[in-house]
Image (spheres, rainbow, N blue to C red):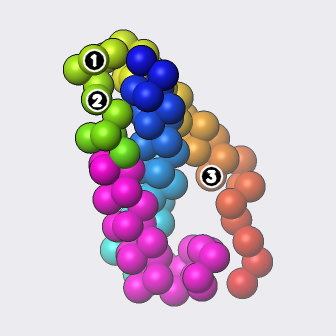
Amino acid sequence: MIQAIGLGLLAGLMIGNGLPHFIKGVTGERYPTVFGSGPLVNLAAGWSGIGLGVLALVAADLPDAPLAGGAALALGVLLMGLFHARGLAWGRD
């Protein structure tokens, strides 16, 4: 169950962080990442973040602990959403 919680939380954080970067990349907007802020960089960062989150989700073995793992996944997405919504991820170009 601890594996499902830890990997579920990691998956939520990765997917929650990957989504805004992927969306900004697809729409052609600039958004800061550690690798730059251009649209192509954001597309690649978002796509890889979502992909790594899905891999963590598969490794979480959610059928073993669906409630705990699902709650951890939801918490990770919420925490990353709050991080982005509060402007904490917003750097200066």
Residue 67 percent coordinates (x, y): 36, 13
Where is 76 relative to 70, above or below? below
Q: Residue furthest left?
A: 63
* Along the line of sight, the residue nearer the viewer: 47 or 30: 47
Identity of the amino acid at label 2? Asp
Return the mark for residue 91: none
Residue 8, image x, y percentages: 42, 33
Could you tell me how far apart the alpha carbons at marks 3 and 2 are, in whole angstroms? 28 Å
Q: Residues within 10 Å of mark 3 (few under 14, many from 20)?
A: some
Mark 3 or 2: in front is 2
Residue identifier under label 1 = 64
With 76 as the anchor, is 67 left or right in this view? Answer: left
Q: Which residue is mark 3?
A: 84
Q: Nearer the viewer, residue 86 or 41?
A: 41
Residue 73, visible in the rendered structure: no
Q: Quadrant of residue 80?
A: top right
Q: Residue drawn at (30%, 49%), measured in percent from left and top?
A: 54
Q: Which residues are magenta?
A: 29-55
Q: Quadrant of the C terminus?
A: bottom right
Compared across the picture, whether 42 is left or right of 88 comes to left
Image quadrant where one finds the N terminus: top left
For image coordinates 50% across by 32% down, the residue present is: 6
Contact (Cβ within 8 Å) of mark 2 with mark 1: yes
Residue 63, can we see it? Answer: yes
18 within the magenta span: no
Query: Which element is circle 3 on?
Result: helix
Residue flagged by tag 1: what amino acid is it? Asp
Q: Nearer the viewer, residue 34 or 90?
A: 34
Q: Which mark is residue 61?
A: 2
